[in-house]
Image: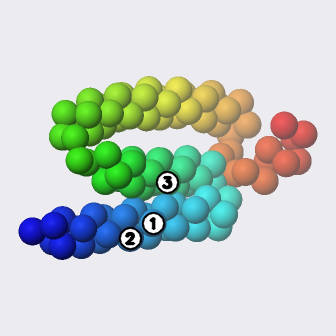
Amino acid sequence: MIVVDQLTGLVVMISAAIIIGIGSYGVTSSKSLFRQLLSIEVIFNGLLVLVLSLISFDAMMATYFGIIIISVVSAEVIVVVSILVAYMRQSKSLSSEDLEEGGV
């Protein structure tokens, strides 16, 4: 039984590492700020899966930690999307190259 639990934990950790890799590839390869934001969210979700698999020995602690992390990430998404909408209204573009040219 312990071998199955350790194997399951290993599979979850490898899956989380793959998710984090996909997110970091999206951040580095995309020029759109919106796609970069989504890729950063993928990285956060991969980290959430990784941390929850590490603290899964205590189910209540993992549940509380997961709820807190999901709440914080949701609030962060709302703030960043509103900043992107304000930036898009001002510059009419969501390209990250515009940020470099504009001196931001």
Q: Please state the horizontal and vertical placement of residue 11, each as a whole percent of the image.
A: 29, 71
Kindly indicate the quadrant of the structure image that contains residue 74.
Answer: top left
> Where's the C terminus, which quadrant?
top right
Answer above or below: position of 97 versus 25: above
Residue at which label 2 appears: 14
The residue sitting at the left extreme is 1
**Among numbered discs 1 and 3, the one appearing first in the sequence:** 1
Nearer the camera: disc 2 or disc 3: 2
102 or 7: which is nearer to us?
7
In terms of secondary structure, where does tag 1 sit? helix
The spot of residue 25 in percent (x, y) is 58, 67
- Distance of mark 2 from mark 3, alpha carbons? 14 Å
Please say if 91 is above or below 53: above
* Disc 1 crowd, CA 10 A, few/some/many (<14, 14-19, 20+): some
Give the residue drawn at x 44%, y 51%.
Answer: 47
**What residue lies at 31% left-to-right and 53% top-to-bottom?**
53
CA distance for labels 1 and 3: 9 Å
Tag 2 and tag 1, C-beta contact below 8 Å: yes
Callout 2: helix, strand or loop?
A: helix
Q: Position of residue 56 (x, y in %)?
A: 25, 48
Name the residue beneath numbered marker 3. 43
